[in-house]
Image (cartoon, coloured by chain):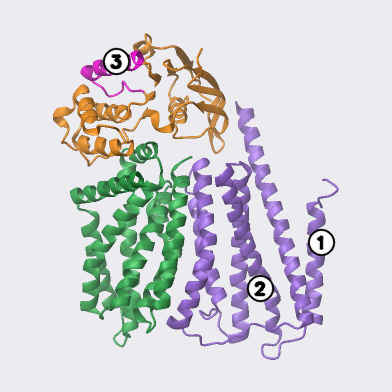
Chain colours: A purple, B green, C orange
Amino acid sequence: MSITRPSLSALAALAVALAAASVLMIFFIAPEDADQGLSQKIFYVHVPIALTAYACFGLGAWKALRLLLTRGERYDLESYTGIHQGTIFGALTLVTGSIWAKASWGVWWTWSSNQLVLFLVLFLFYCAYFMLRFSIEPGPQRERISAVYALFGVALIPVSFFAIRLASDFIHPTVFTRAGPQMTGSMFAAFCTSWAAITLLAYVMYRTELAGKRTDVNLRELREALAR
Amino acid sequence: MTAYLGDVAALARKDLRLELRARDTLPAMALFVVATLVVFHFALPAGASEDAAYGLLWVALVFTALLGLGRAWTPESEAGALDGLVLATSDRSAIWLGKALATLAFLLAAEVVALPAFALFFAPLDGPALLGVLLASVGICAVGSLVSAMAAAARGREVLLPLLFLPLAIPLVVGGVGSSISPEPGAYLAFLGLYDAVFAILSWAAFEYVVTE
Amino acid sequence: MAEPIVRAAGLEKRYGLRPVLRDVSFELEPGGALVVTGPNGAGKSTLLRLIGGLAAPSRGSLEIRTERRKVGFLGHEPLVYRELTALENLDLYGRLYRVPERRERIGMLLERFGLWEARHQRISSYSRGMTQRLALCRALLHEPDLVVLDEPHSSLDDEGLTLLDAELGTLAAAGKTLVVATHDPGRVASLATAHIDLERA
């Protein structure tokens, strides 16, 4: 490990520390919401998870673009891992969103949360990414097709967002109105700490998974070489 | 530029000629969409609103398009012709554009059957609704042709294509239904135009990478 | 020796982790003929696809000093549309390749390979030998400088074989560069200027 680049274990320790700090801040420093009470606290986890999912999909798409433009060998695994992490955090977004909906409105699902519906569409899209990827023989074609699909994903994010906005405008008029939380100072601090913790956690998970996959590949290559 | 368009025209003509000879895809699509509409009549409860019927029109259109898209690249995979086209074309995106245009022709032909049937069975279709169908059809064929080529490279392509296509088709359904039932269809039609522009350009640029190594 | 038209150095091709070609190196001068032999599964077809431009090497370098569309390729599949006629297939390729005086060239090739009478029949009605001949027409349609042929003699009857051998001789005499994969190197021995024998990777 170089001196300038923090080691993965150091980052992991930092993530745990931040997570602990954010839990403390969420429960003891940030004020309780007047309307929703304790259940509103899940917002501090749900929104950063959603933002992290977007970031992971963005990372996956960026690596995909690099792959197509430079044919670099490393980008395929990096893009795949980014998409994989994004899908995990996307699933968590749906779960935390569902919990929040249950706590706030008594229903496990609502179509009136544009964010939640968007994640449902994206979740479907990215699940299909894995189906696509694992239906193609390993090789350059699989890498390129996966990369193109990853790029389509980030194009779909804003387009779907608009579509869902339009849909809720007319086709499904909003039954529940939910103003975005106006954050006071301490709420904002708790939010940022939580966001930092989750982002760092995602980064650590990304690096860990990538290292694991690379080791896998190296191991198999060695086995192949020895078998000959 | 004219040479490029000439390539596109030659490729689209080839697909039209093939369909005229085989005559299997287009009749299947037309029959499928009418049968689906009949199923929907039985699926809709008695007090269902007219708006619900418009929603089902779009479901029918999307699945009819899937039927056509599933077979779009079959002639190219039979005797390896796709490799031949990849070798021969100066710009591979012409392959995608030719295929998308031909698929659009088939989809529009199926809609010539579907839309009057819908108006007969369920509810009338006004100008904005028809424009919405046209715009959405462009988007379906643009994205669908690319995604179908991806599926063609994979195992289990018949199952894979709907999984790849449906999430991408959701915005089109929103735009289409909105243009049919909203008293202000302008926003929905504009949105469909935006979708078409974004995904047509993306598909046009990305196709090369899907069919080459 | 003039600048080689094809130069391969340390060529490697793998699909995922499965190696198909390992450490292939050769140089082919313009007007030369490279014969590629080896058992089934040794990677002959893969090597030819690399030279033809249908695949990219995983490692190593492959330089081809001619335009992509000046390469003619005959693979295991004929690369045609079964439900179009011979004429329609060649006309499409002729347009895409921008072949000058397309009709004349197509007519000439069809006659040379004995397919003129069958030009209006769909390929689905062709025998395997006729299909192979049509594939040859398609590969040569645009007067390529580099002709890559993967087992061109397969499926041909005696007449087809004679036509093919004559064509290969004509191409070589005209200074075209050839790459031929074959199970029967003796057939092309007189033309060969270089030989690669591939082993299973």
- Which residue has dot 2 on it? A47
Q: Position of residue C165 (x, y in %)?
A: 29, 15
Examine the structure image and report whether residue C158 is included in the region drawn in magenta.
yes
To which quarter of the image does residue B164 belong?
bottom left
Circle nearer the N terminus (1, 2):
1
Report the side of C185 relative to B42 (left or right): right
Q: Secondary structure at mark 3?
A: helix
Q: Nearer the viewer, residue C140 or B111?
A: C140
Q: Secondary structure at mark 1?
A: helix
Measuring 79% from the left and 57% from the top, which residue is drawn there? A11
Q: Position of residue C138 (x, y in %)?
A: 29, 31
Mark 1 vs mark 3: in front:
3
Please give the range of residues in magenta. C151-174
> Are discs 3 and 2 located on one and the same chain?
no
- Which residue has dot 3 on it? C165
Q: Residue pushed farthest left?
A: C117
Measuring 80% from the left and 77% from the top, which residue is drawn there? A25
Whether residue A19 is visible here, answered yes or no, is yes
Q: Residues within 10 Å of mark 3 (few under 14, many from 20)?
A: some
Q: Nearer the viewer, residue C196 or A110?
A: C196
